[in-house]
Image (spheres, rainbow, N blue to C red):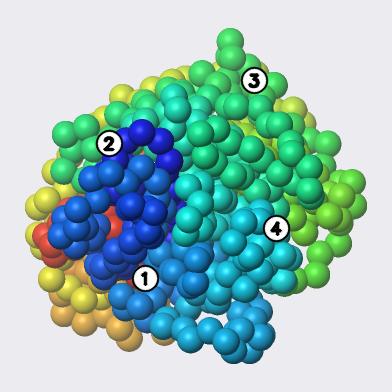
Amino acid sequence: MCGIVGYTGKRNAKDVLITCLRMLEYRGYDSAGIAVVENNKVRVIKSVGKIDNLEQSVSRYDLSTSTIGIGHTRWATHGKVTLENAHPHKVGKVTLVHNGVIENYKEIDEKLNKYEFKSETDSERVCALIDSFYNGHNEIEAIKKATSLLKGSYALGIIFEGNNKLYGIKKDTPLVLGIGTNEYFLASDISAFLKYTKEYIVLDDNEIVEIGNSFNIYYEDKQIYKKIEYTDYDLEEAMKNGYEHYMLKEINEQIDISRKLYSKYINDDNFSDKLIDFSKYKRIDFIGCGSAYNASLIAKYFIDKYCTNANFYCNSYMASEYRYTNHYFDKDVLTVFVSQSGETADTLASLRMCNSEGVDTVAIVNVLTSTMAREAKYVLPMLAGPEICVATTKGYFSQSYICSLLVLNLMYKTGLIDKDKLLSIFDEFKKLPENIEKVINQDYKKVAKSIYKSEDIYYIGRGIDIYSSFEGSLKLKEISYIHSECIGAGELKHGPIALISKDTPVIALLSEFSVAEKTINNINEAKSRGAYVVTIRKESINVDKKLSDCDIVVPLTNEFIQNLLIIIACQLLSYEVAKLRKCDIDKPRNLSKSVTVE
Ligand code: M6R
């Protein structure tokens, strides 16, 4: 998704803006630009492609005295990836960067016929709209009048020619003010300015920030005062730390995250009261997108398996469907929103819908400054630290871990398991870091070499392995661009087996003992059609050597966390495949980290 930055202070603005933009690269973008005030004139410089290209273009100008400016990474929505469509946009005396989507921009366009537009973007129309209300001195009034006409979502960083200040406003998409010593930042998220300051204020909808030598925040004609917050996010944490890719670093961080999650949610061999008690509800709806949705299926799986007899009912929904479906809500319903970023548009819209229905809401969320973390009734922090790679690994891990704990807590509170059983399960949670290490230390390169040239790879599994397959297959396709599908093993012969021919890779997940024999039969069916079989199995399930061309074995643990070991093997296999295919692993094409548009 697009990223916004802004700076005013004593440093060279172009250097700060480029450094901040680099920290937002993970969000995904296809063009970038900055605008700085140099000798009272606004200079806009843009380029298509990577920030390196922008840096080259910028180096052609002498911008040595600029101390105020805005910058942007654009992820194309309205209009193609072109220089004209890249931000910042400048119309009249107004220059701005925009993140979000203006739904009524065509209507606005029709009212702005005195302007000639260079781009196809909604953002340039917003720029002109502000300019049309600007009388040369009342900047706040112009911003207010213009934004009152907008429908949709926006975070805007704005500068006005002849006025040495920076302005920001947002609605339904995040904008944060960073507060340094005699310098200020605007950004889509705090990671942009961590190098310079850890103090920040999260702006709420329709608040306008005006930044000069100090800053003022206004809401509905009044100046307001907000608490300055401090983040303990570490810049080091957000850097690669010697790993070749963020993805690899983040996979390795799962060892430490499992320790952090254990000490937050389990105290003295009991559940911490920080974990939400599901037992007072009857129906639990989990809602998320992409991998977050896949993680929520783990909760559904265990609730279906163990809690339906106790009259608990659970479903997992894709947020993009949930928000447009009718639901019956009462006090027995709990809705759980799963999101790493806490900003995903469909999940956020679903959360707001549930809040407005008065139903209890919980956010399992990583970014604690996010909108979901602030709007949900209860928050369960994922403790994963900044996730930079667009493809989630540690985010999914943490979501899935918390889902398992929530179900175990429910089972314990309702007497479905006793203390002895619980303690033996906790022992396995304690051993998880060392088991993850064992999984990470295996050789995935060899397996990757045998499948990376294929254009189609299928994942199969039964029981919980179907849900892990969803995630394994998503990971593979998003970073390697190999077409991959996940098929319930028992469904193969109902159609998909027609796709299997000589050497088609089929990755079979085997962690569910009760159905392992059946999955092995299905592997046999694929094998006899020529499939090249990769098995990823827990060590207690054996597979005939003749059946499996490559065999990856993960340590045996309790079923509530067995899937975590299986998925780490899938993550590493996808990583090695993508590396062999020379893909841009951390920033896969067409994807963005935080999907703040519908
Ligand atoms: O930030 P969120 O957890 O709400 O993001 C949800 C999905 O967009 C995200 O999981 C996406 O599917 C990832 N690219 C998967 O790796």
Q: Earlier in the sequence, mark 1 or mark 2?
A: 1
What label sits on residue 272 in the rendered view?
Answer: 3
SS assignment at label 4: helix
SS assignment at label 2: loop
Give the residue furthest to the top: 268
Q: Earlier in the sequence, mark 4 or mark 2?
A: 4
* Residue at image point 62% right, 65% down: 134
Q: Which residue is mark 1?
A: 86
Q: Position of residue 162 (x, y in %)?
A: 48, 56
Q: Which residue is mark 4?
A: 141
Image quadrant where residue 10 sits: top left
Q: Earlier in the sequence, mark 1 or mark 4?
A: 1
Q: Is residue 442 above or below residue 451?
A: above
Q: Give the quadrant of the C terminus.
A: bottom right
Foreground tag (4 vs 3):
4
Q: Position of residue 288 (x, y in %)?
A: 59, 56
Question: What's the CA distance linking mark 1 and mark 4?
Answer: 26 Å
